[in-house]
Amino acid sequence: MLESGRLQVRAAPLAGWSPDFTVFSDAAGPSAVLTGFHWFERPYPHRGPALSSLHFADATRVTSRRHTELWQTARDIGPAVWSILSKARPRGMAVAAGPG
């Protein structure tokens, strides 16, 4: 999906992207927003529960506008992510050592 352009990845580390959120859209526009727990490290770095919430209608439209603001100023990191992923090997695959 990343290689085809269907998935896009951008970074906006100082842009106020908090709480984390994802806007889901279809051909008709934004349809839902997931707010809250989006963490890609283990273990979760904070004590207590990690909560998320799913929203529709007005909340989706408001969050979609904020997403657009952030997206326009964020950096495209898709090529860097693709470069890393394209070099990754599945777990458990042994790499044969060459002669010498």
Image (cartoon, grey):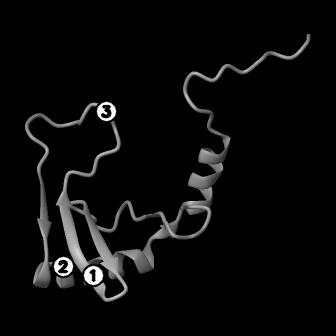
Sequence-first tag of 1 and 2? 1
Does residue 54 appear left or right of residue 3 in this picture? left
Q: Which residue in the structure is indicated by mark 1?
A: 30
Residue 60, numbered circle: 2
| Type of amino acid under label 3 | Arg
Q: What residue is shown with label 3? A: 42
**SS for callout 2:** helix
Q: Position of residue 86 (x, y in %)?
A: 65, 47
Residue extending furthest top? Answer: 100
Check disc 1 and give the amino acid type: Pro
Q: Position of residue 44 (x, y in %)?
A: 23, 36
The tag earlier along the polypeptide, 2 or 3, is: 3
* Residue 53 in the image, given as x and y percentages of width and height: 11, 60
Disc 1: CA contacts within 10 A as few (<14), some (14-19) or many (>=20)? some
The answer to whether 24 is drawn above or below residue 9 in the figure is below
Determine crowd level at label 2: few under 14, some 14-19, many 20+ residues with C-alpha closer than 10 A: many
Q: Which residue corresponds to the image point at 23% horizontal and 36% vertical from the top-left?
A: 45
